[in-house]
Image: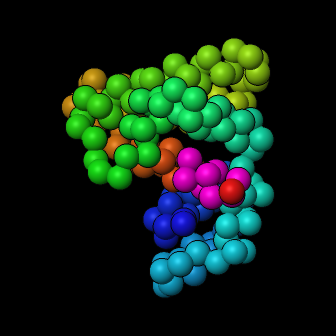
Amino acid sequence: MFTKTDCLSLLFELREKGIDVDKYIKYLLVHSEPTLDIIRTINNNMELSIRAFYEKLRKSYNNNKSKLYINIVKENNLEPKEVLCTLASLQLQILLFNKTLNDPSFLRTARFNEICDCLKLYYTSGDIIPSQKLLELFKADLKFLEETTK
């Protein structure tokens, strides 16, 4: 099931892309469960290439128990070193996936720049919080994909 936090994270990202989702955000700030309309809106605005990427991660987990996938969807917080290794691994997987797509817009959709920024921030200032928040956003995306493909 989708959590309120997962949906809010995804809705805020859609709002940053210029999509009007304020009414859904306001609804979730008051209520504890997302409506079907909220889920449909998130689903309709996810790009196909990012869906394919997340599906590849999920299949990789199903076939050989991918540690990357496990680290992304862990319920508890990872140690700082694990967070950084997970983001760096995710960054590499995004680059490898984009190699077959050859689509620069996929890198933006897959939050490649955000990963780079978080890793750089950690290495320059030691601040792990943006990296943890970004990993939570990836987790929300993966949960959303799993729920919508059942």
Please give left or right for residue 76 compared with residue 69 in the image.
left
Q: Please say whether residue 45 is one of the residues in the magenta stretch.
A: no
Residue 102 image point, x, y percent: 76, 18
143 and 126: which one is in front? 143
The quarter of the image holding the N terminus is bottom right
Q: Quadrant of residue 48?
A: top right
Which residue is rendered at x = 32% and y = 34% of the image? 83
**Where does residue 68 sit, x and y in percent of width and height?**
44, 30
The part of the chain drawn in magenta is 142-149
Image-based side of 59 in relation to 84, left or right:
right
| Above or below, 9 relative to 32 | above
**Toward which corner of the image does residue 81 lie, by quadrant?**
top left
- Residue 45 position, x and y percent, is 74, 54
The spot of residue 128 in percent (x, y) is 27, 38
SS assignment for the magenta stretch, majority: helix
Give the colour scheme shown: rainbow
Q: Is residue 70 visible?
A: yes
Describe residue 50's horizontal placement relative to residue 79 as left or right: right
Left or right, 61 with reference to 19: left
Residue at the image point whose x is 72% and y is 36% from the top: 52
